[in-house]
Image (cartoon, rainbow, N blue to C red):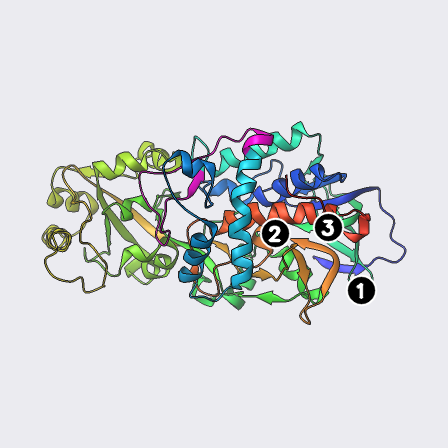
Amino acid sequence: MNAVRPALGITFEATADVLIIGAGAAGLVAALAAHEAGAEVVIVERDGVPSGSTALSAGLIPAAGTRFQRAAGLEDSPTRFARDILAKAHHEPDPSMVAHLAAHVGPVLEWLADRHGLSFDVITNFSYPGHSVMRMHGLPQRTGGELVDRLRTAVEAQGIPVLTGFRATNLYADDEGRISGVAGTRPDGGEERIGCQALVLACNGYGGNRALVARYIPQMSEALWFGHSGNEGDAVLWGEELGADLVHMSGHQGHGSVAQPHGILITWATIMEGGFQVNALAQRFSDESHGYSEQAAQVLLQPEAKAWTIFDARIAAIACQFEDFRQALAQGAIVEANTVADLAGKLGLDGQVLSETAAEVERLKRGEGHDRFARAFAGVPSLVAPYCAVRVTGALFHTQGGLRVDFQARVLKRNGDTLPNLFASGGAAVGVSGSQASGYLSGNGLLTAVALGHIAGRAAAASESLRRQPQPFA
């Protein structure tokens, strides 16, 4: 049972200047930043190998005004990026925090490239919904696993200890909420206590805790959980006990395109490049282009909570840059046929209805009529044989609500005061998506993981507890 316990009289087997819970992107970036600022850093990670939600993602980080964009001939700015975030999130998040993160993430990516050898570039062959400029940065393999591996390698190269198999259970705090250390269990069942001068929570959200999901996002309580099993809401539970302010707790990222029964994420390029979704009646049921997050709930409302994404070989070739899609191909999740009627037969759908649906989509792409779901099809490329399809369901990927933090990633109490030496980043901190799934702009999760992770690491290393002065960003 996770709890916050009195620190008085507690002794610790080991200590660190900055202790970080969680070794996903947020925790690893925080560790690199704190170490560079001169702190002695230790990371504790519940799994045997660092992964977290980052490893389940495509590893794509949105950033604006980077040299990687300029190399691709793309003009962008943090101001424009912040505007896109707020528009997608219905202007619910704090605009000053959005602007702060949008301005910070680009320099962090360049720092990771220059100091730690991460070779980012920008995806330029399709756009993500809500982004007015192509700004999704990724590593060559386009996987979250690659991102975690490269960050872990960088951490190891700096000699930063990562204690795997450490399941943090209790925080020790005084009456003012100052954290003195953490207790955790080890694989052999023993308990270990580690003291710290500052603590960074980088242990993600609560999507794997069904009770918390039912409390905060009841409409997704029975949805497929496609996030990391360690997302049990540790930060939320500790924060509640410490009096932290919890914000936008119903916010989350869903995804309306998880291949079934294979359980593989299918890139939304299948939609944005001209594909569409149908239900078991072979009929469209929504404006698919709004975004994959809000589409999860639409898919779950369909018979048997399933749908089929219809696209073509051209789109499949674009999607093949992602390892997940290549896996879906290898496992037979992608069905192909030379006619729409034959495709329907292979899918078990009504051929006449699917042909009529496909024909209607093609008319809309030619500018003939208006879509009853208000999707803007004009100018979108037509689908041509061979046609492709994949059966999908909707899923909950990760939560976007969490602990409210200030510009230095310090956790704030409900009265607005800061907890003395507690910092949060990634899924532990409130994101920039607001309170609705439709507020999630592609990459918001890794935006806060990387930007807030860097901010939290440097601020923790420069905190009053360590009696160090903040250093300029390098």
Label 2 vs 1, first from the N-terminus: 1
* Label 1 Cα crowd, 10 Å radius (few <14 / some 14-19 / many 20+): few
Q: Is mark 3 on a helix, strand or loop?
A: strand
Query: In the rendered structure, which segment of residues is drawn in magenta?
Result: 113-137
> As rendered, which of 54 and 96 lies closer to the eye?
96
Rendering coords of residue 278 (x, y %): 23, 54
Lateral position of residue 391 relative to residue 71, left or right: left
Residue 425 is labelled as: 2
- Circles 2 and 1, Cβ within 8 Å, touching? The answer is no
**Residue at label 3?**
199
Count of numbered labels shown in the rendering:
3
Which quadrant: the N terminus? Answer: bottom right
Horizontal and vertical percent for residue 418? 71, 63
Q: Estimate the spatial distance between the alpha carbons at disc 3 and disc 2, rounded to whole Å.
A: 11 Å
User: How far apart, in angstroms, are the residues tagged by discs 2 and 1?
Assistant: 21 Å
Say which residue label 1 marks: 176
User: Residue 403, located in which quarter of the rendered image?
Assistant: bottom right
Q: Name the quadrant containing residue 317.
A: top left
Q: Residue 389 carries which label?
A: none
Residue kind at label 3, given as amino acid type: Leu
Say if residue 46 shows up in the picture: no
Q: Quadrant of the C terminus?
A: top right
User: Element type at marker 1?
Assistant: loop
Q: Residue 4: horizontal and vertical position, in percent?
A: 75, 60
Residue 413 x/y as whole percent? 69, 67
Q: Determine whether label 3 and label 2 are within 8 Å by CB.
A: no
* Residue 463 vs residue 179, the one in the foreground: 463
Going from N to C along the chain, the mark reached first, 3 or 1, is 1
